[in-house]
Image (cartoon, grey):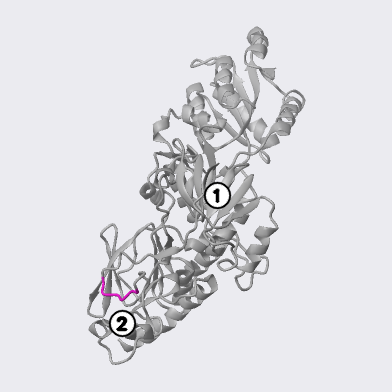
Amino acid sequence: MKQPVIFALDDDLQVLQALVRDLRIRYRKDYKILSTASAREALESLVELKNKGEEIALFISDQRMPEMLGVDFLQKAREMYPEARRVLLTAYSDTEAAIKAINEVKLDYYFMKPWNPPEERLFPVIDDLLEEWQYTYSPNYQGIRIIGYQWSPKSHELKDFLSGNLFPYQWLDIETNEKAKELLELNQIDHCSLPVLFFEDGSYLPHSQLGAITERLGLQARASKELYDVVIIGAGPAGLAAAVYGASEGLKTLLIERKAPGGQAGTSSRIENYLGFPTGLSGSELTRRAVTQAQRFGTELISQQQVTDINLNSQYKIITLSDGTEINARSVVITTGVDYRKLDKPGIEDFTGAGIYYGAAMTEAQACQEKEVYVIGGGNSAGQAAMHLAKYAANVHIVIRKESLSSTMSQYLIDQINSTRNIHVLGNTEIAEAKGEKRLQELVLTKENGQKRTVPADSLFIFIGARPYTDWIGLNIIKNDKGFIETGRDLTLSPNYRKFWKLEREPFLLETCSPGIFAAGDVRSGAMNRIASAVGEGAMAIKFVHEYLAEV
């Protein structure tokens, strides 16, 4: 936690040096002592300190200064730091101004210069003022802050990006948070520039673009090597496992992720059926551990880059990224996973990011405080989201087309849902329409018998099955009719198998119809759609990578 600040101002350098010396002797263990001889420079510094989230406990200012009277400075300082204690340094002739300032700027004390000895004339007063300030002091959040509108899709995109990439942040709603309004006014930022991202050093990015943020946060966007033994496309559980085993076994390993590491599992509020974690863990915690482990072994991770194509050049795979750069690889593991299917109903697209979200229960949960929340979907992801949202919302309604959850959700989740009083399961029900003005406000629900009703709704979280993220693959990779990648012996059932597979041996278990290109996890046809199985397939893919590299 940052130390609170004691801010000293005096245009007489000798007096200022003496004051700072005495303050540091007494208070440097608990406070940061800052000083300047210029009132204008002091005001500029206060803006920077405010942007950084620094807290000022005490101002000490001389009264007679050429740029500005001390009383005027303390008045301006009070506007930015109203809770800070204010002390004026005066000569005998200025005592009348000091007494008047007690009422005008709520002056807490004034000192006659000189204040020697400080043990008798300075420290006892400052001690009392600082102790009084500490009673009401609540430390400011230290880190990244986002200011924006709660129901703005751009704000949601920014929050989702930071949480997905494991960057903690504080959300400040411009409509309800006074600190947010103060920061915008202080920096003269127009509301049309929102959302604005403030960094810990006080700098900020208005109308933030993910490309600029990625660079500012230090995320790697370009490969550093000319050739990799294995390039893994997708940093979900399968991709992270492949990265850990590939790098730990000496392969030059590159992991490429278009959004955020962890995949759909990374957004889960609680995973309770993963081996070795009897009390469960969050998807973000599992992701953080896996990313750290992969990078410790030497995996290179590229974020916010989308693979647009894979081409072959003899034994090498040429991977093209969305920015036009190319990466050379000896082998490839595709672990791009799946995306949530879109809900194609009137109004859904209009309010996506403004009350309607695909996944993102962790990101938007706090905004659901005492609200009416709907979750559509009957799988484990929907159940985990409902349990997490129930901690905040007045009521959580799970909308499913089937009569009950028993055929689609794990029993441990069903038991938890049944024992949570503010979760309600709406069976044989579908969402027909979303309504509202600028944000979601109502949902039209349809029963199996055709009966319709309109209900108030503040948020809707969509978890309706998945479609594989494989549309980008232009290479002759055989997929099934739903777009999942076929691998191993299943390839032999395809009429195009011999057209593409020219080796004498059969494909390895996780190998596609293009030798040296493998698929693992949910993107693969026949996958089990469990985190543990995805991790197992990611590790197994590296075994086959070794066998492939040994023969070329």
Left or right of residue 395: residue 457: left
Q: 388 or 197, which lies in front? A: 388
Q: Is residue 355 magenta?
A: no
Q: Quadrant of the C terminus?
A: bottom left
Q: Considering only order in the chain, which callout, 2 or 1, is on the residue closer to the N terminus? A: 1
Up-down relation of residue 400 to residue 535 (above or below): above
Gap between marks 1 and 2 measured at Cα: 42 Å
Q: Amino acid type of disc 1?
A: Tyr
Q: Quadrant of the N terminus?
A: top right
Q: Residue at x 42, y 31 (%)?
A: 191
Badge 1 marks a residue whose secondary structure is: strand
Q: 355 or 106, which lies in front? A: 355
Instruction: Provide the residue span drawn in magenta.
Output: 475-480
Q: Is residue 477 magenta?
A: yes
Up-down relation of residue 21 to residue 348 (above or below): above
Left or right of residue 405: residue 474: left
Q: Which mark is residue 374?
A: 1
Q: Residue at x 50, y 15 (%)?
A: 66
User: x%, y% of residue 46?
Assistant: 52, 29
User: x%, y% of residue 309?
Assistant: 27, 66
Q: Which residue is mark 2?
A: 494
Which image quarter: residue 252?
A: bottom left
Does the rendering let one see residue 469? yes
User: x%, y% of residue 486?
Assistant: 36, 77
